[in-house]
Image (tube, rainbow, N blue to C red):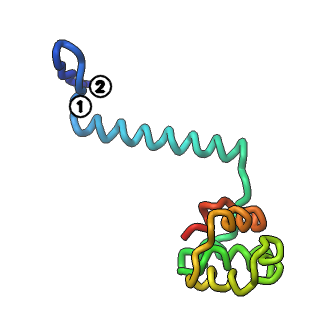
Amino acid sequence: MKAQVLKKDGKPEFAVLPIIEYRNLIKRLEDLEDARDIREYRTNPGESFPAAVMNQIIDGSHSLKVFREYRGLTLEELGSTCGVSAAALSQIENGKREPSVNLLKKLSEALRVDVDILIG
């Protein structure tokens, strides 16, 4: 690698690379990150979901509704588990209401998904 080191006050401050070497370096870092992610997944795979489930979310369905239905729960069952009414959950699923942080935690536990996936 042919890096030019630029100094400031006699100390190395910047490294300048030819663009091709910079691009190769970035590509290599991305490959290393991918390899790390694969190793992490192999040691702790977690749950995966069918493409049809994820496609519903991509197509605009609320993730709460998608995962509730995927888990085979009615609004009443999920509401009872989380201490909220079926009507309140329906409003959330239809985008008319935002859940509190506390409710999001309960929903994620009941549906066995990360909170992040429930946040649109």
Q: What quarter of the picture does the C terminus occupy?
A: bottom right
Q: Amino acid at mark 1?
A: Leu
Mark 2: amino acid: Met
As drawn, 109 above or below 26: below
Tell me the mark number nearer the camera, choosing from 2 and 1: 1
**20 displayed left or right of 38:** left
Task: Name the one closer to the observer, 97 or 44.
Answer: 97
Tag on residue 17? 1
Near mark 2 (Cα within 10 A), the count class, few <14, some 14-19 or many ≥20, is few
Callout 2 secondary element: loop
Relative to residue 87, is residue 110 depicted above or below? above
Q: Residue furthest top?
A: 10
Q: CA distance from mark 2 to mark 1?
A: 8 Å
Residue ID at (56%, 41%): 35
Q: Which quadrant of the figure has residue 17?
A: top left
Q: Which residue is mark 2?
A: 1
* Element type at mark 1: loop
